């Protein structure tokens, strides 16, 4: 057995829920006391391992804690309990256009993003044509990205992230915005990526996509790990659960 790419060990993440309604700055100042907050566990005691060179999916209903867990993996949030071990360099693509500067052109954003993801300028230049070509944004590459469609944003962001060649790529739903042709291209790129021993962790609501792309899947339900295992088995369990719900 090779060492896992990622170890999620009893991870919990808590948020505070503020009870008071209609809270304004004025009323908060006037009251001069702390507001009452309930604790709420968005992720509760979740453990799993992601094998190196695999594609790992996270599924679950809206609000089940998938994005929160991904943010913990991306080190944007810190777990309140438990630990996460990443064996390698990670890059993440969490929200459409996150990490892009709206006033800069696509080309400038490639450099900005590439360097945030740890690539030297000369290495970005060396991969520039490939990045632009894969993104498919064409002549718009020298336009400010604020004028891009959401699909174009994602394509460019994804293209930079995958060409930076991190050991672990963390992707939240963004592929859902791409059109069919881009999804196909992305799938092929992911395959190339994992074939070279790299690891992908992705969140999606498309069970077809999960079955097609993922080796293993973790199903989160209200922050807790409901099941983890082969994509086929876990998506089947989840589908049965969904079918039994009313909405
Ligand atoms: N910064 C925050 N402060 C308070 N609560 C939060 C915060 N971020 C997320 N939550 C709550 O944590 C829960 C899990 O949210 P999360 O975004 O992880 O769900 P998700 O599984 O990604 O859902 P979706 O499928 O809708 O994207 C939700 O109830 C959400 O309201
Ligand atoms: Mg989410």
Image (spheres, rainbow, N blue to C red):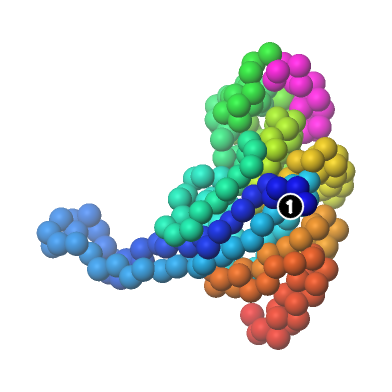
* Residue 69 showing in the rendered view: yes
Q: Residue at x 70, y 79 (%)?
A: 242
Work out whether 146 lies above or below 19: above
- Local crowd size for mark 1, using a 10 Å CA cut-off: few (<14), some (14–19), many (≥20): many
Q: Secondary structure at mark 1?
A: loop
Tell me the quarter of the picture where residue 50 sits.
bottom right
Q: Is 24 on the left or on the right of 47, as rendered?
A: left
Q: Residue at x 25, y 58 (%)?
A: 24
Which span is picked out in magenta?
123-139
Work out whether 133 lies above or below 40: above
Q: Is mark 1 within 8 Å of ligand 1?
A: no
Q: Quadrant of the C terminus?
A: bottom right
Tell me how many marks there are. 1
Q: Is 107 on the left or on the right of 17, as rendered?
A: right
Q: Is 98 on the left or on the right of 56, as rendered?
A: left
Tell me the quarter of the picture where residue 90 sits.
top right
Q: Residue at x 70, y 30 (%)?
A: 164
Q: Is 112 on the left or on the right of 181, as rendered?
A: left
Q: Position of residue 88 (x, y in %)?
A: 65, 38
Report the front residue among 118 and 1.
1
Q: Position of residue 121 (x, y in %)?
A: 64, 16
Q: Residue at x 73, y 52 (%)?
A: 51
Magenta stretch holds residue 133? yes
Tell me the chief SS of the magenta region: helix
Q: Position of residue 198 (x, y in %)?
A: 76, 41
The residue at which mark 1 appears reads as 51
Work out whether 29 lies above or below 238: above
Q: Position of residue 236 (x, y in %)?
A: 79, 75
What is the residue that sits farthest to the front in this orientation?
1
């Amino acid at each position: 057995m090779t060492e896992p790419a990622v170890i999620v060990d009893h991870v919990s993440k808590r948020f505070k829920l503020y009870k008071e309604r209609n809270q304004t700055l004025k009323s908060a100042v006037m009251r001069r006391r702390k507001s009452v907050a309930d604790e709420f566990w968005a992720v509760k005691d979740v453990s799993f391992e992601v094998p190196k060179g695999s594609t790992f999916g996270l599924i679950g209903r809206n609000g089940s804690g998938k994005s929160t867990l991904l943010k913990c993996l991306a080190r944007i949030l810190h777990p309140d309990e438990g630990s996460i071990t990443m064996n390698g360099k990670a890059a993440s693509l969490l929200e459409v256009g996150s990490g892009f500067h709206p006033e800069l052109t696509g080309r400038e954003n490639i450099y900005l993003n590439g360097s945030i993801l740890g690539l030297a300028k000369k290495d970005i230049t060396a991969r520039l044509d490939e990045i632009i070509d894969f993104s498919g944004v064409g002549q718009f590459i020298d336009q400010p990205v604020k004028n891009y469609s959401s699909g174009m944003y994602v394509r460019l962001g994804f293209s930079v992230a995958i060409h930076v060649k991190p050991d672990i790529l963390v992707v939240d739903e963004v592929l859902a915005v791409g059109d069919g042709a881009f999804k196909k291209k992305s799938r092929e790129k992911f395959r190339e990526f994992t074939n070279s021993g790299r690891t992908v962790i992705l969140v999606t609501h498309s069970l077809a996509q999960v079955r097609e792309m993922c080796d293993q899947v973790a199903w989160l339900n209200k922050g807790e790990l409901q099941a983890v295992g082969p994509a086929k088995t876990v998506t089947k369990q989840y589908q049965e659960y969904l079918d039994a719900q009313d909405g």
